[in-house]
Amino acid sequence: MRKKRTALAAAILIASLFMAQNVNYAESVSERVVTTSGNSQETDKSTSAESFETQQASSLKESTETVGKSEGTKPSAATSSEPKAASANQENDKAVAVPEGMEAVAEKDGLTLYLKPETTEIAVKDKQNGAMWFSNPQDREADAIATGYNKSQLNVQFELTYYDNTGNALKYDNFTHSVESGQFEVEKVEDGLNIVYTLGEVKSDIEAIPKYISEERFNTLILAKLKERDQKEIEKRFKYDEKNKRFERRDSSLKGVGLSKVTRIFESVGYDEAQIAIDKAAYGEEENGLASVVVPVHYRLEDGRLRVSIPENGIQYPDTMKIQSLSLLPFFGASGPKDKGYSLVPDGSGSLIYFNNKKTLVSPYSTALYGGDDAVNQLSQIQKEQKARMPVFGMSYGDKGYLAVIDKGDAVASVEADVSGRLNQYNTVHSSFTLSSMEEVTLTNGWRSSTVKRFQAQPFHNEMAVVYEFLGADDASYSGMASTYRDYLTQQKKLIRLADDTELPFYVELIGGIPKKKFFLGIPYNAYEPLTTFEEAQDILKEMQSLGVKDIQLRYSGWFNGGIHHDMPKSIDVDKKLGGVKGFQSLQAYAQQNGFGLYPDVSFLEAFPEAKGFKKSYASRQITGKLAQLFPYRISTFIRDDEVPPGYVISPEAVPGIVSGFLRDYKEMGLSGLSLRDLGDQLNSDFNRAKVINREQAKEVIMQQLEQVRSSEASLLVEGGNSYASPYARHIVDAPVSNSGFNITDEAVPFFQLVYHGYVQYTGMAWNMADDQDSHMQMLRAIETGSAPYYTWFYADPSAIKLTSFDALYSADYRRWIQESAERYKELSNVLQDVQNQTIVKHEKLSKGVYQTTFEKGKTVIVNYNDAAVNIKGISVAAKSYQVGGDMPE
């Protein structure tokens, strides 16, 4: 008997192990990959994500297990593991089991869109590889981590956060506040569907029941007229307030059937509008019930992609609500605790968050695109983080993945990501949109003070859209995602490839003049300090030429209207202490004769302290109505320094007039290049209550100015490289080359460089201004990422910047760097000169500190950052060195 029990227990254990196998929500069901080595939650940081993808994609499929429509469903003939004489696509079509209750609503360009009408969750089938992508995890009921609210959240397609009229922070989601009550409508349209959600109880129903009613009226007007069964029904829907001798409605119990029952009972005793008016008058408008919000969500199959959008002016809600943000499809493609892969987030140059990395004690990833909004009051700066320059995110499972592009509303969007184990068992990445910004105002009256919230006068109402592109095994990597996004930019934004004869540039920024406080007989006065005259700039260029440096791209900062912190650029007045107009024309002629690029620098989005020509009407307003001022932050405390004169944020409303005035003088000077200090780097709102200009509208204004400048046939150099500016730029400086180092991220990747190489030339921060001024390491990083060298210099003696606000330029004396920079440029040119107009098709981590970059025509470079030599694929690479090759053996 004991042996029988032992055998039975063993059989049960084996069966449970089979049943416990994890479902990969994005995988082809007919081709499950079973991983049996190691704990999938322990990520080996020294293993390349790209190498892992290649290995997984080429692995033999060890399991022919298929998933039926639901538990207990018998597998159909289509799920048979026996080989059939059919194409791969046909096999996948037969093998993929669509979950029970889902129905196909659209099919186009190799994608099929499914809907589950009861829950409004959607799925997309990629017929090319048989992958199914779900808006929500399909085994969420089995999640052992999520409970209560977090469990319910696994059902949502979007969530709103908002403040009510008393300042309470609340949340709405489409499942809890719409789907469960059946308050939604589905409309099938060509190539997709529309779902309109009504969130919150229907107002007419809930208002038929009093929020508060006195004890006397409750007993005599309601209970006294009811039978015992109905009395019990009513009593459990109200709670007694002993202090105020009244009954309060239990809103949480008045949903669906419960609401219908109570409404019917109150109608039966003659409780009508006149009666509820009496109770409202007795207790005032104290009702804090759920307001009604209408949110339409559109799904479309377009050009082989899934486009999810909320149309312009689509969200309808009462004025008393202040909707702050909307999270869209927070669980799309979510991976489970046994999946291997990573999420891509746009932190700096790009970051990977490995699935199940166990980092549940650190903050989830959340970053606003294009950096902060200077029109939003910020008293302190917590840390210096890399801006998210690209509106993208994605997931890779190794043999399949997706890239999501925030197509509309990206200027108010953020990307959020988290790993399994914190709130639930899933790894997620998604977009959210800020619909209304907020500031807190402290009001004082004598010794009393209170803080109230102020919201922007006009909330964001533009279209919000995310486009999902699904990737097969060949593209399911961050390299493949970069290629996909590059294709998107060329098709949608007209990004143009570089010419075949493009050479590796040497970027140098020369600082012209700076403001400096000087003293006469002990009396301080503002003066102008020339750091590099036009004649001295020519001397530097000649010296660089003599050292063999070619293709110099000169960015000249501080050349007009009072130096680097120039006056309002509505016109151009070349600084006389640098050589005036004649000196500038001489420099311009020299650059043209030698084939150098000359990019005079200008700032359009900031009025510097005490700038001439500035009017308060030019400035953006904060939500409180104050002028949006710019103060430096103290390095020691990260708190802004209010003791120095402030600059001002220029309103997008004023920018076009300023740019037009500048361009009139610019064209007369015959210039062919222009450096834009901030049009490709900053994005600010104007919260003027008379006319709010949100960040999306500000982005459109900036793009119009970029188009205007380009129409003047100027070659553009931009700083930072926000995505919307890239199609207009010929050069990008200060591009992100790493990430912010957030604890939740695992790896920095050159996604930015993978996108732009061959289309826009770029470089990171000036090598001599970076935290790491080791030019050899900077060169290795440039070789790995296909970047150019970049230096910031001035000619004057370094003592010229003492006692100024430009102490950060302490390492900009060109004499310290020019010889070394020429040597680095020559070596870098030998490696990268012939690939300037080629794309980077693959970047991968071969081992810890060792990376390989593969260019379009097969050239490869392996870079070793380690202190010891390594041998990779039979190739030896010395310590802190690199090796150039051709097609590498697999």
Image: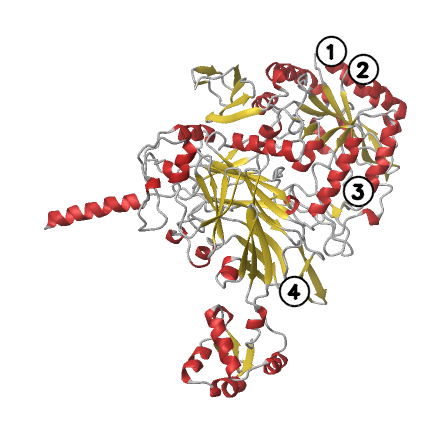
The numbered dot on residue 655 is 3
Instruction: Please provide percent x and percent y for residue 709.
Output: 79, 33
**Quadrant (top left/top right/bottom left/bottom right) for the C terminus:** top left
- Provide the secondary structure element on which disc 4 rests: loop
Looking at the picture, tell me which residue is in the foreground, 522 or 108.
108
Instruction: Examine the rendering and report whether any part of residue 41 can be seen.
Output: no
Left or right: 889 as drawn, with respect to 824: left
Left or right: 485 as drawn, with respect to 126: right
Q: Earlier in the sequence, mark 3 or mark 4?
A: 4
- Provide the secondary structure element on which disc 1 rests: helix
Task: Residue type at mark 1: give it.
Answer: Ser
Between the C-alphas of marks 3 and 2, the distance is 34 Å
Between the C-alphas of marks 3 and 1, the distance is 42 Å
Compared with 506, 326 (above or below) is: below
Q: Which residue is mark 2?
A: 593
Between the C-alphas of marks 3 and 4, the distance is 33 Å
Between the C-alphas of marks 2 and 4, the distance is 65 Å
Instruction: Please provide percent x and percent y for residue 867.
Output: 49, 21
Looking at the picture, tell me which residue is in the foreground, 508 or 144.
144
Between the C-alphas of marks 1 and 2, the distance is 16 Å
Task: Residue type at mark 3: give it.
Answer: Val
Task: Residue type at mark 4: give it.
Answer: Thr
Instruction: Please provide percent x and percent y for residue 404.
Output: 55, 40
Q: Residues within 10 Å of mark 2 (few under 14, many from 20)?
A: few
Q: Are marks 3 and 1 in contact (CB under 8 Å)?
A: no
Q: Earlier in the sequence, mark 3 or mark 1?
A: 1
Q: Residues within 10 Å of mark 3 (few under 14, many from 20)?
A: many
Q: Residues within 10 Å of mark 1 (few under 14, many from 20)?
A: few
Looking at the picture, tell me which residue is in the foreground, 78 or 489.
78
Task: Residue type at mark 2: give it.
Answer: Gln
Q: Are marks 4 and 1 in contact (CB under 8 Å)?
A: no
Q: Which residue is mark 1?
A: 546
